[in-house]
Image (cartoon, helix red, strand yellow):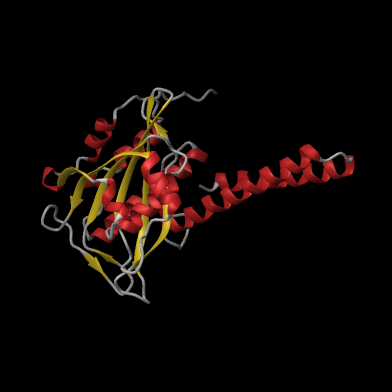
Amino acid sequence: MTTEVQPLQSISFDDFLDLLAVPKACEINKPIFKKMFLDASDGKKAIFDVADKKALKGDIDKIRWLYTLKPNTINIAPYKDQEREYPEIAILHIELAQSERLKRIAHFINRAIPYPLVMLFTCEASSAQNLALVLADKRINQADKEKWVIENSIHTRWITLTSVSSAEYEFFESLKISKLPFTNFFALYQALIERVVAVKCAEHSGIFSIEKAAASSQKTSSTARLDKLRELERLGALRSEISNKLKKEKQMGKQVELNTQIKQINDEIANIQGSL
């Protein structure tokens, strides 16, 4: 029995925004100028170091503040506890000239803007537009209540918009605002993280599934799956390291040993992928 191959879809970035269906009342659509980031500080010193400034100047073409979700623009309550404060959520579009320093750029933008952010990065490559979503949980720094700690940053891989897989398109559709919980902004943001985790799992399984995550562990669904994704990343790096050693190894006995280690790692990877 053959498996039917799902056709790839081609969409534009504007088509993607249409899928989000953010209410018009939330629209900002204003540029953010690079100088704002250069002037950013934590109250004592500038946030950006030399490498950050180089990435800001050389890698970023444009930044636009697309939307802000606030209680007065959408019927969602703010959230606050001892560790976190989610009064609103900002959605930014960052156009990159090159994609290599995505993580660094996402990190310094998160440090500079004190709100939970949904960052939509686009970058042209091989005459095609590519999209990556970046999210990061933020909590209050208990040593200094005016500062925040960025944790659990997560991003999708670069998705080529001219060849979107069925799993990736399901992911896009799942981001529609009306499909997300309206309990409060923290609940909405965690639902977004869960969807990014799900599409990262789909890179291994080929299937986009949020429901499967909910039954996978007594932990929160996104945390349980994220742990597995991080283990896959660790095992992949270890396999590459051993493969490099194998290429240089001359002794037959050692080659057999290294090949055995690689097979064991491949088995572990396959087991984890099967549980995603």
Judging depth in this view, the residue of 272 and 34 nearest the camera is 34
Where residue 182 sits in the image (x, y, percent)? 21, 55
Query: Residue shown at 45%/40% (left/top)?
Result: 157
Judging depth in this view, the residue of 8 and 114 nearest the camera is 114
Where residue 16 sits in the image (x, y, percent)? 28, 34
Judging depth in this view, the residue of 27 and 44 nearest the camera is 44
Q: How many marks?
A: 0
Where residue 146 sits in the image (x, y, percent)? 29, 71
Quadrant that contains the N terminus: top right
Query: Residue shown at 41%/50% (left/top)?
Result: 52
Q: Is residue 107 above or below residue 148?
A: above
Query: Residue shown at 35%/34% (left/top)?
Result: 169
Residue 266 occupies quadrant: top right
Query: Residue shown at 38%/54% (left/top)?
Result: 108
Q: Is residue 146 above or below residue 130?
A: below
Q: Residue furthest bottom?
A: 143
Judging depth in this view, the residue of 121 and 206 nearest the camera is 121
The reply to whether residue 211 is in sight is no
Residue 214 occupies quadrant: bottom left
Report the side of 248 relative to 16 (left or right): right
Where residue 161 sits in the image (x, y, percent)? 36, 29
The reply to whether residue 94 is in sight is yes
Residue 62 occupies quadrant: top left
